[in-house]
């Protein structure tokens, strides 16, 4: 769980391919993408980090789903570590149980080629 010096968000978000998520639903767990497995943890984002993550790692992909997970449900396996520009990103050291996902939403591409995020991810 985050320390006092780290973000303490209610939700963290995982962007994943729809086929990978369908497979996870069947298996009961999501083990992560090839990049996640290579890095040894599942990459998550905070709401304000989603646009940058989508642009940098998922540009042009129309087969995406956004998963929202309560940070508190991930326990000590969730760590916040410096990444892009020194910003702290949530990383899950272990598989994601599909039962931990609070909600999911498609990430359609707009006419401008930018993904449309669900209103629930809007930050003030």
Image (cartoon, rainbow, N blue to C red):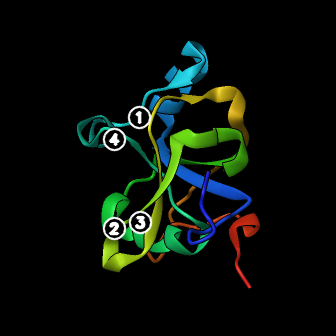
Discs 2/4, front: 2
Residue at horizontal 36%, vertical 58%? 58
Q: Residues within 10 Å of mark 1 (few under 14, many from 20)?
A: many
Report the Cα–Cα distance between label 1 and label 4.
5 Å
Residue at horizontal 35%, vertical 77%? 86
Whether pointer 1 and pointer 3 mark residues with C-beta atoms closer than 8 Å, the reply is: no
Which of disc 4 and disc 3 is earlier in sequence?
A: 4
Marker count (numbered): 4
Where residue 123 sits, quadrant-wise, is: bottom right
Q: Secondary structure at mark 1?
A: loop
Which of disc 4 and disc 2 is earlier in sequence?
A: 4
* Disc on res. 83: 2
Report the Cα–Cα distance between label 1 and label 3.
16 Å
Residue denoted by label 3: 53
Discs 2/1, front: 2
* Disc on res. 36: 4
Discs 3/4, front: 4
Whether pointer 3 and pointer 4 mark residues with C-beta atoms closer than 8 Å, the reply is: no
Q: Residue furthest front?
A: 4
């Amino acid at each position: 769980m985050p320390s006092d010096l780290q973000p303490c968000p209610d939700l963290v978000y995982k962007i994943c391919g729809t086929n990978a998520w369908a497979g996870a639903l069947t298996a009961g767990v999501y083990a992560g993408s090839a990049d996640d497995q290579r890095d040894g943890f599942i990459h998550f984002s905070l709401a304000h980090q989603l646009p940058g993550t989508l642009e940098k790692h998922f540009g042009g992909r129309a087969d995406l789903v956004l998963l929202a997970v309560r940070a508190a449900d991930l326990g000590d396996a969730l760590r916040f570590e410096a990444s892009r520009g020194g910003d702290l990103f949530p990383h899950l050291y272990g598989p994601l149980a599909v039962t931990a996902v609070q909600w999911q939403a498609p990430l359609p591409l707009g006419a401008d080629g930018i993904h449309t995020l669900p209103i629930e991810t809007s930050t003030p």
